Amino acid sequence: MMHFFSWIFVSVVLGHAALVLSKSIQNGEYIIEFDDSSIEQSLSKAKFSLIYFYSDTCKYCRQFEPDFESLSVLYNNVTTDNGKNLQIIKTNAKKNSRLSELFSIRRYPTLKLLNFETKEIIDYDRTNRDIDTVIDFLASMVPDAVPGNYNKVKELDESNFDDFISGSSSGVMVVFTMSYVNGWNHYDMPGHYFQKFASSSESDVQFGIVDAEKVSTGELVSKYQISNFPSIIYFANDGKFKTYKTRASNHLDTEALKEPEITEFLLNLDSQDEIYGTWFNSIADLEASYENSVEYDGFKQHRAGFNVRQNAKKEKEGSADVDEEYNDLLEHIEL
């Protein structure tokens, strides 16, 4: 432990979240960053400040970013009767030499807890920096350091899927994804935009997520003919459902599925077109739609409900010959 003797001036960067359908919590709304230009003004906003010192070139900092974003969501909107007790804040220590010297920063990432009233600095002494360990550290060091509540998206599999869908009196939106998909490897953390979107939604829609890597069978993926991840199905309370990007054939073009797309999808639930998805009255209608619109041609085509990554670049160049590739495969495996 050490004491903090000198002060400079701080700037706080707060983003403004757009209000579309819901009060969506963008990362920027709770991410607080400061620099050498005005330290005291920023750190005086709370009795305690957990400060994250990072560098742009530090790979371990990039690994910690999702945890930092989640911590910011959980704590930076929480106040007590006496005001704000704790804030989560960060600074680029590589670019801010005064702060680095002031807090004796020698490596990245570094976490330090400042008690603004006593000017005491407490080093983060835990081996791990995952969100649960940091929350435990804060609970042991900061009085009343209780993270805010958020409505975590329900994780679904074969055992609870049907009950979750049928048990809702309002609509249910389910994202089908895999943790390897770009932007979805931290989907279960409070800082992930889908978690924040669901938690802050003003609508009565319930939110769930199916990780196709975790389900014990391919029943759900096959039943709803999911050939692309991530994709969405919205279930109305009258038994109808609407699919969105579930049959997309090129994951390179569709794996983004960001918050604006989800918002637009919900805003256009009444539409029936390829842009905002397709409504079906039943699984039978879904199956009939596929059978009527696509002629299955053996090895030349991937069946609905199976996610197979295509060589998009080769196909775009027009050099892919399915028959040649198939015959070449048979020759090499001696069939």
Image (cartoon, rainbow, N blue to C red):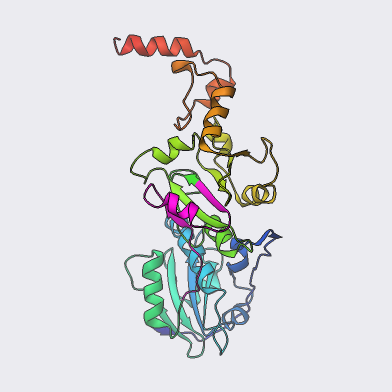
Residue sticking out furthest to the left? 334
Looking at the picture, does residue 125 appear above or below residue 203? below
Q: Give percent across and percent down for residue 197.
A: 58, 59
Total residue callouts: 0
Above/below status of 122 relative to 255? below
Q: Residue 18: where, in percent of width, then height? A: 70, 60
- The residue closer to the viewer here, 170 or 173, is 170
Quadrant (top left/top right/bottom left/bottom right) for the N terminus: bottom left
Q: Is residue 104 visible?
A: no
Give the camera-side residue of 46 and 153.
153
Residue at image position (34%, 65%) is: 128
Question: What residue sits 42% from the left and 57% below the top?
Answer: 60
In the rendered image, residue 155 lying in the magenta stretch gets the answer: yes
Q: Which residues are magenta?
A: 147-175
Residue at image point 34% right, 9% down: 331
Q: Quadrant of residue 252?
A: top right
Q: Residue 92 in the image: x percent, y percent?
A: 54, 65
- 61 on left or right of 276: left
Q: Nearer the viewer, residue 280 or 334?
A: 280
Percent across and percent down for residue 227 are 49, 33
Q: Quadrant of residue 16?
A: bottom right
Q: Is residue 307 magenta?
A: no
Left/right placement of residue 140 relative to residue 232 reads left
Residue 12 vertical position relative to residue 63 in the rendered view, above or below: below
- Give the quadrant of the C terminus: top left
Q: Nearer the viewer, residue 3 or 62?
A: 62
Q: Is residue 165 visible?
A: yes
